[in-house]
Amino acid sequence: MKAGFPELPTIELGKGCRVSRLMIGSNPMAGFSHQSPERDREMLGHYTSARVLELLRRCEALGLRSVLLRGDRFFSRLWSEHRAEGGRLTWVAQTASELADQAAHVQALAAQGASAVYIHGTWADNLWHDGRFEEVRELARRIREAGVAVGLATHQPQVIDHVESQGWDLDFYLGSFYNLAKQHKRVAAVEGLDASVEVYDPADREAMCRAIRATARPCLAFKVLAAGRNSGSPESLRAAFEFAYANIKLTDAVVVGVCQKDRDELAEDVAIVRGILTGRQP
């Protein structure tokens, strides 16, 4: 680890898969800003393959030991390049729900080196709305057969409550602080949607935090910055992180997106979180 940046605190997701209590996700790298089509294009233009690899190296240098990346072909290839150049991050992979054969897909992710695979939240939430949620359970079973930690993402607290009541064989959850799937939701990766109309209701995060605290399983909280809406100033950014860590369990972690185009957002986030987790000002 680079001198001066010790490793951030970690948690275990399952099957020996340890991750940092702060991780970055791949939405900005894939051009999904959840802000506007213009911001989507800006992010996509910035994140060339070389810059994604640079960001992964920056994660390691700042003390992160894990990263959350979509399991599509683009990120799978970049993951292989990261490992080939000596990278040591742990990969938590999101299923790419646009791929037709999800069972074969999760087998491929395990073979490519993912330590954990979780089911795409929008895909799972839509099956919930469609009354076909048992298909999600079947995919979770396939992930277990692949020999990696099994996760499920959702925007809806009631999904976590239901899965807990049914005793599913899962290792961890991802829970969105903002419920963007209160009804059937179109998939941005498939349809290229304008996310500027998304509603970020502050009451949603209270409900998700209750569900996160009610399960003994580790949870990865995402959308804690409301896709950048809670980070307009250093004070609001810190307040969002403080709320997140105060309202999840000690066995949970936070996932955020960063865009490094204009400044080192990752370093800013890590400094704040390191201070919160150690009880120090950054």
Image (cartoon, rainbow, N blue to C red):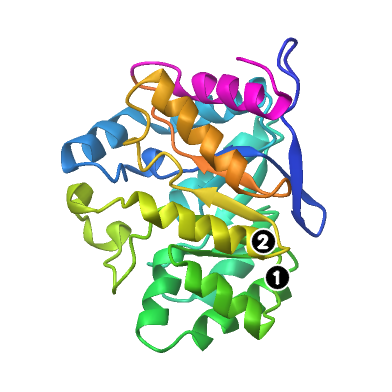
Report the magenta stretch's main SS: helix
Q: Choose top left, top right, bottom left or bottom right for residue 278.
A: top right
Q: Residue at x 41, y 39 (%)?
A: 225
Residue position marked by numbered label 2 in the rendering: 110
210 or 195, which lies in front?
210
Q: Is residue 186 left or right of residue 6?
A: left
- Identity of the amino acid at label 2? Ala
Q: Residue at x 45, y 64 (%)?
A: 121
**Magenta part of the protein: which range?**
262-282
Residue 65 location (% of width, % of height): 70, 35
Q: Is residue 233 left or right of residue 139?
A: left
Residue at disc 1, secondary structure: loop
- Identity of the amino acid at label 1? Ala
Residue position marked by numbered label 1 in the rendering: 146
Q: Choose top left, top right, bottom left or bottom right for residue 160.
A: bottom right
Q: Is residue 256 left or right of residue 34?
A: right
Asked whether the residues under the numbered discs 1 and 2 touch, taking CB atoms below 8 Å apart as contact, a structural biologist would say yes
Residue at disc 2, secondary structure: helix
Q: Is residue 182 visible?
A: yes
Residue 222 location (% of width, % of height): 49, 48
Please rate how many residues cluster around mark 2, counting C-alpha atoms within 10 Å: few if below 14, some from 14 to 19, many from 20.
Answer: some
Alpha carbon separation for disc pair 1 and 2: 6 Å
Question: Does 126 appear above or below 11?
Answer: below
Task: Indicate which disc, 1 or 2, sits on the residue closer to the N terminus.
Answer: 2
Residue 192 location (% of width, % of height): 22, 55
Q: Is residue 218 left or right of residue 259?
A: right
Q: Residue at x 49, y 67 (%)?
A: 157
Q: Residue at x 37, y 39 (%)?
A: 28
Quarter placement of the C terminus: top right
